[in-house]
Amino acid sequence: MFTRRAKRATIQHPKFYFFDTGIYSALRPSGPLDRPEEKSGAAIEGIVAQHIRAWIDYRKHDCKLYFWRTSSGSEVDFIVYGKGIFQAIEVKNANRLHPQDLRSLKTFREDYPEAERIFLYRGKEKLKREGILIIPCEEFLLRLT
C-alpha cells in the first residue's frame, strides 16, 4: 500500500497476486454469475505485476512495487516508487479506452503531481491524454527488458 504523504484516507488492505497467472486461472472458482472478463482482468494485472517485480529484481533498482486505494474507492493498480522513479500504472482488460478509465490516475495526480501516470490496455493505439501515457499492455511489457 502506497501511503507516502497521503492526503486522502487510504485502505490498508493487502493486495495478493498469485505467482503464476495460469495457476490463478485454474484455481479460481467460476460459476454462472462470473463474467470471463473479470477472471482475465485479474490475470492481466497479475502478469503486469510479475513483469514489474522481475524488472525491479533483475535491474537491481532501488524501488518497490505498491498499490494505492482510497476509502472512497479510487484505486491505482501499481505504484513503482524509489530512487529516481515514481510511476502510477493502471491496467484495464479492454480493447477500447473510456474516459472513466482514467479517473483513478487523475485522482492520484491531485495528490502526487510529480508521478508519471501510465494507463495499460489491450488496444493498439499509443496516446497521451491529460498527462497520462496510454499504451498497449504488450508494448509496455516488452519495453521493460
Image (spheres, helix red, strand yellow):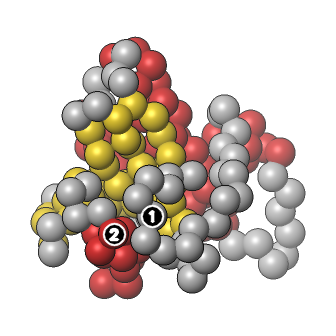
143 sits to left or right of 69: left
Query: In this orientation, which residue lies closer to the viewer: 6 or 107?
Result: 6
Q: Is residue 22 above or below residue 135?
A: above
CB within 8 Å, label 2 to label 1? yes
What residue is rendered at 15% in x and 74% in y? 130
User: In which quadrant of the rendered view does residue 72 lie?
Assistant: bottom right
Question: Which residue is located at x 36 percent, y 24 percent?
Answer: 62
Q: Nearer the N terminus, badge 2 or badge 1?
A: 1
Q: Is residue 31 visible?
A: yes
**Image location of residue 24, percent across then percent down:** 73, 43
Q: Residues within 10 Å of mark 2 (few under 14, many from 20)?
A: few
SS state under label 1: loop
For disc 2, the marked residue is 111
Locate the C terminus and report the quarter of the image it occupies: top left
Look at label 1 and name its amino acid: Ala
Q: CA distance from mark 2 to mark 1?
A: 7 Å
